Image (tube, rainbow, N blue to C red):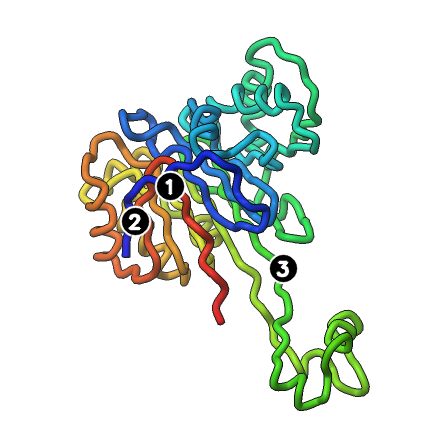
Amino acid sequence: MGTTGTTTGTSRLPVSVRELVVLGTASQVPTRHRNHNGYVLRWDGEGLLFDPGEGTQRQMLRAGVAAHDLNRICVTHFHGDHSLGLAGVIQRINLDRVPHEVTAHYPESGQRFFDRLRYATAYRETVRLTEAPVAADGVLARTPSYTLETARLSHPVESFGYRLVEPDGRRMLPERLAAHGIEGPDIGRIQREGALGGVTLDEVSETRRGQRFAFVMDTRLCDGVHALADGCDLLVIESTFLDEDERLAAEHGHLTAGQAARVARDAGVRHLVLTHFSQRYGDPAVFEQQARAAGFTGGLTVASDLLRVPVPPRHP
């Protein structure tokens, strides 16, 4: 079932939540109902802000996202609808004296643009903002909760998509534990030590696949798109054009709704979020229709401003 409604919020979210908060969904030109880009991924108490376009600071206020919630800022490329909000967000982080380090990722080739936006006007720096520019595909950061990866996209200016991968874990199997007489504190012990009384952890548990999220903005079809989308539980991907305008999409370095959906279908994506819509289209339902016509059968959201999309629960 598609989702096209709008949800607002005024309170901060619980730290355990994993969800996408949509701040803006327009492409180059904002509309009366769509702000420029902006997306926050809430992941186990951390917040990753993607592509803060113009007006992001105000959209954060409307969505109940505070500057204190942000740990990373990830910019795909330096077109205005994906980066002009940086100045306001960075200044707000400093005004609110965020108590932790904030890391910014962005294409290294756009360092001059980042510098201009970071120091667009006078303000007092109170927060450690670490610049971590992206120059090639690969791993950007490793934390206990996730690995952040990047891959190059295909757009008129250099652009990179982002992918977050949770480490695989172990799922304990109660029936096997009981069969081996393992209970109480011994369950924790075998998890820590890997074996107990001749019984290995593999005998009483199975791999719990880590969850995966990807963020793919302005791009034509390319290897990076498919690599980022592979096996994602939640994929956020641009669908600037409808399928009848595929030629325009390729010319300007974008995807159509059908192309984005076929990427998700072939990658085994569980929930697809379409966004970054051209102002030329008035009916968002058509994006859903074309995505379904392309053969995608998983969860589908046609994004609207201030919508929240949860990361799908783990497979049983």
Q: Earlier in the sequence, mark 3 or mark 2?
A: 2
Residue 3 is tagged as 2
- Give the spatial CA distance, label 2 vs label 1: 9 Å
Would residue 138 be seen by someone viewing this image from the given angle? Answer: no
Callout 3 amino acid: Pro
Identified at 47% across, 33% down, the residue is 51
- Give the spatial CA distance, label 3 vs label 2: 29 Å
Q: Earlier in the sequence, mark 1 or mark 3?
A: 3
Circles 2 and 1, Cβ within 8 Å, touching? The answer is yes
The secondary element bearing badge 2 is classed as loop
Residue denoted by label 1: 307
Would residue 275 be seen by someone viewing this image from the given angle? Answer: yes
Residue 167 is tagged as 3
Residue 60 is tagged as none
> Which residue occupies the extreme top position in the image?
122
Disc count in the image? Answer: 3
Residue 222 percent coordinates (x, y): 41, 48
Callout 1 amino acid: Leu
Identified at 57% across, 10% down, the residue is 121
Identified at 31% across, 42% down, the residue is 239
Q: In the visual, does 133 lie left or right of 293?
A: right
The secondary element bearing badge 1 is classed as loop
Callout 2 amino acid: Thr
Is residue 197 shown above or below 192?
below
